[in-house]
Image: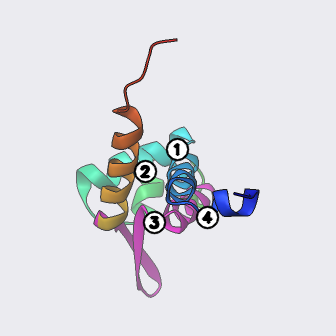
Amino acid sequence: MNRLDSLRSPDARRDAELARFAKALGHPARVAIVRLLARDGACVCGDIVDRLPLAQATVSQHLKVLKEAGLLRGDVDPPRVCYCIDPRGLARAKALFGTLLNQQGDPA
């Protein structure tokens, strides 16, 4: 099996998907945004900005990363965007993290 074939394997695709979720959650502000939306449901970007000690542009960038990773949805209601947890993306992330964290092997 060559290197490209190994990248196309189901395990490699799952690992890449898991890494995408991990990268999206790899910043404390993004974790805080996910926590806020999980607790409160949908929220307009401006409301998120009001609840975090971050500039609007910074919050918008973090929302973009989370949305691109599939963890959030953004429903446009001009001129506002209402963000919420994407249940399918969150379920997939939970499943992938759960599989990884529940693997048991020999302790090092």
- Judging from the image, what secondary structure is the residue with disc 3 in? loop
Which amino acid type is shown beneath numbered disc 4? Arg
Q: On residue 45, which mark appears?
A: none
Q: Circle 1 is placed at which residue position?
A: 29
Estimate the spatial distance between the alpha carbons at disc 4 and disc 3, rounded to whole Å: 21 Å
Residue 88 lies, with reference to residue 49, above or below; the image says below
Which residue is at the far bottom? 78
| Residue 85 appears in view | no
| Residue 14 appears in view | yes
Q: On residue 33, which mark appears?
A: 2
First in residue order: circle 2 vs circle 3: 2
Please report the residue visible at 42 percent of the width from the left and 23 percent of the height from the top.
Answer: 105
Where does the N terminus fall, quadrant-wise? bottom right
Q: Circle 3 is placed at which residue position?
A: 70
First in residue order: circle 4 vs circle 2: 4
Question: Of residues 42 and 96, which is closer to you in this image?
Answer: 96
Residues packed near mark 1 inside 10 Å, few (<14), some (14 to 19) or many (20 plus): some
- Judging from the image, what secondary structure is the residue with disc 2 in? helix
Residue 79 lies, with reference to residue 37, above or below; the image says below
First in residue order: circle 1 vs circle 3: 1
- Tell us which disc is closer to us: 1 or 4: 4
Q: Position of residue 14 (x, y in %)?
A: 49, 56
Which residue is at the far right? 3
- Judging from the image, what secondary structure is the residue with disc 4 in? loop
- Tell us which disc is closer to us: 2 or 3: 3
